[in-house]
Amino acid sequence: PRIAVLASGRGSNLAALIAARDAGTLPVEFALVASDKADAGALRLAEAAGIPTLALSPKAYPDRRAYDLDLLDRVAASGAELLVLAGFMRVIDAEALRPWVGRVINIHPSLLPKYRGLHTHRRALEAGDAEHGVSVHFVTAELDGGPVIAQARLTIEAGDDEQRLAERLLPLEHRLLPAVLGLLASGRLQWRDDGAHYAGQPL
Ligand code: GRF
């Protein structure tokens, strides 16, 4: 299937998806990589990989909904059938998201439902958690609230601060996101009208 990726940052998760596709382990085509930041590293990675890119500035829009509707229109126009949020730092408007529910996933650096939102590593450290991790979930209108598909976890170590924890989590992200996208791309993971299912069993 054709996929689009939304990213706001350096794009290491995008790079992992491209590497999995190049290795032949992820049966997807990249239709578009779009960003709300013209200087996002993810756009440079996409250009280098010959993937069409779009930098759409929110400043040019009267409000969030207008921006999100146009962004997702462009995603649809690219022929993308699945949408991956890989470090996309905006919450997508419910109206704009509606046609995509079930076809959009996000990677979030926490063991959801813990620590929805931002500063997840700091919050896990401050809570004195023994474990931390990353989650890939279906995106719904509720921030980091859709059904969790898969998680990877690690033990928080004595020397961990926010940055080291983020660094130790990245390799887990880079394995988890391609794996989950592969399930979605191959149809083993699907969103039916009665919710998300894996291999025919409800999540
Ligand atoms: C990752 O930590 C991801 O969990 C979060 O934002 C970061 C994206 O990093 N959503 P990158 O742009 O993929 O390197």
Image (cartoon, rainbow, N blue to C red):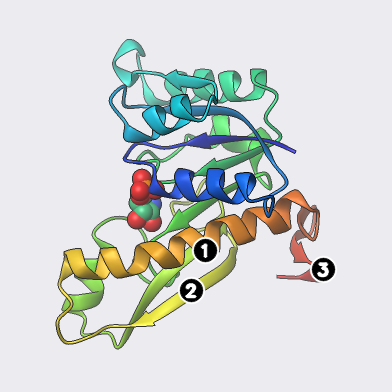
Q: Please name the amino acid that badge 1 sits on.
A: Arg
Q: CA distance from mark 2 to mark 3?
A: 20 Å
Residue carrying label 2: 152
- Residue 149 percent coordinates (x, y): 61, 65
Instruction: Please state the horizontal and vertical placement of residue 137, each as a whole percent of the image.
Output: 55, 59
Seen from the viewer's position, the closer of residues 200 and 3 is: 3
> Which amino acid type is marked by label 2?
Ala
- The residue that mark 1 highlights is 175
Amino acid type shown at disc 3:
Ala
Counting other residues with Cα less than 10 Å from the Cα at mark 3, is it few (<14), some (14-19), or many (20 or more)? few
Q: Tell me where residue 7 sits by quadrant.
A: top left
Q: Residue at x 31, y 70 (%)?
A: 168
Residue 164 is left or right of residue 151, and the answer is left
Q: Which residue is mark 3?
A: 199
Quadrant for the C terminus in the image: bottom right
Q: Residues within 10 Å of mark 1 (few under 14, many from 20)?
A: some
User: Where residue 188 sits: x, y (%)?
Assistant: 80, 60
- Identified at 61% across, 44% down, the residue is 22
Report whether residue 140 is seen.
no
